[in-house]
Image (spheres, rainbow, N blue to C red):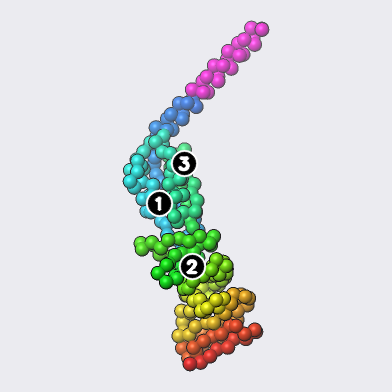
Amino acid sequence: MKKNQVLFIFILLLYIIFITFLIFFSIKMHRNRKIKKLHIIIMNTAYNKHFLDEKMIKNILFNKNKYKNIDNKIGEICVLEMENKLNNYPFIKKSEVFISVDGTININILQKEPILRIKNGKKEFYLTKDSEELEIYPFYSSNVILAKGPFSKEEKKYLLELVEFINYDNLLKNQIISIKKKEDNSFILIPKIGNHYIMLGNMKDFKDKLYKLKSFYKQYLNKISLDQYKIVDLQYKNQIVAKKR
């Protein structure tokens, strides 16, 4: 082996050792740095349907566990443990935790979205857009449509579609506050304004029925007193039958 080759290998080894030392030293320095702050982002908080805020996230992570507060060194923080703790909370769908180079703990939360509240006798729960049942908590509430009655799995699926359609329409969202099951495959809607109820009937073609209801409200909502009506029936094809008291 030539002398130049030996010198090159020696310099290369010194360089590798130096770089390894720098990396090890940087990691050690980074792990000994204190956490500077928390940056919490809670996604999908539209329509006042959320149960979570920053205070709750802090309580989940730093209350009654080894992280008494955020005055910890970076090396003492286990990101995976924090994610597991958050993901085990009933209203959190998914979480992501990472520490940036400036010492900030970044927490991204995707929460479960309650679409409606179902009450069947003494049993009451929220239903998410993924058809998951969420327990009612006395300290948290969500401003969603209430549905009353015993609903089958198939009926819950149609209820979610119905409520999502209502929620994406400003007029219907501001007017429809409750859904009741009258009998098998027959439903009524309870409006916010007017002392009447809306006969929806079965869920077949519910979009067409609600379009008719929108036309009815646009024509009469601010022009006449809806208290004179007892029933607004959407079950007839291409027409609305409004029955007076």
Task: Tell me, yes or no, if residue 48 can be seen here.
Answer: no
Question: Residue 101's spot in the image, x, y percent?
Answer: 47, 38
Look at 50% across and 27% down and name the residue there: 23
Q: 10 Å neighbourhood of mark 3: few (<14), some, or many (≥20)?
A: few
Q: Nearer the viewer, residue 50 or 130?
A: 130
Q: Is residue 112 left or right of residue 235?
A: left
Determine the CA span between mark 1 and mark 2.
24 Å
Q: What residue would you read off at disc 2? A: 116
Determine the CA span between mark 3 and mark 2.
32 Å
Look at 56% across and 85% down and name the residue there: 233
Badge 3 amino acid: Leu
Q: Quadrant of the N terminus?
A: top right
Badge 2 amino acid: Leu
Look at 51% across and 70% down and name the residue there: 151
Q: Secondary structure at mark 2?
A: strand
Mark 3 or 1, closer to the camera: 3
Q: What residue would you read off at disc 3? A: 80
Q: Is residue 243 left or right of residue 52?
A: right
User: Where 7 sits versus 93, above or below?
Assistant: above
User: Where 66 sits versus 234, above or below?
Assistant: above
Badge 1 amino acid: Ile
Query: Looking at the rendered structure, which numbered label has been put on residue 92?
Result: none
Q: Earlier in the sequence, mark 3 or mark 2?
A: 3
Q: Nearer the viewer, residue 180 or 70?
A: 180
Q: What residue would you read off at disc 1? A: 57
Specify start and end residues of the magenta stretch as a single range: 1-21
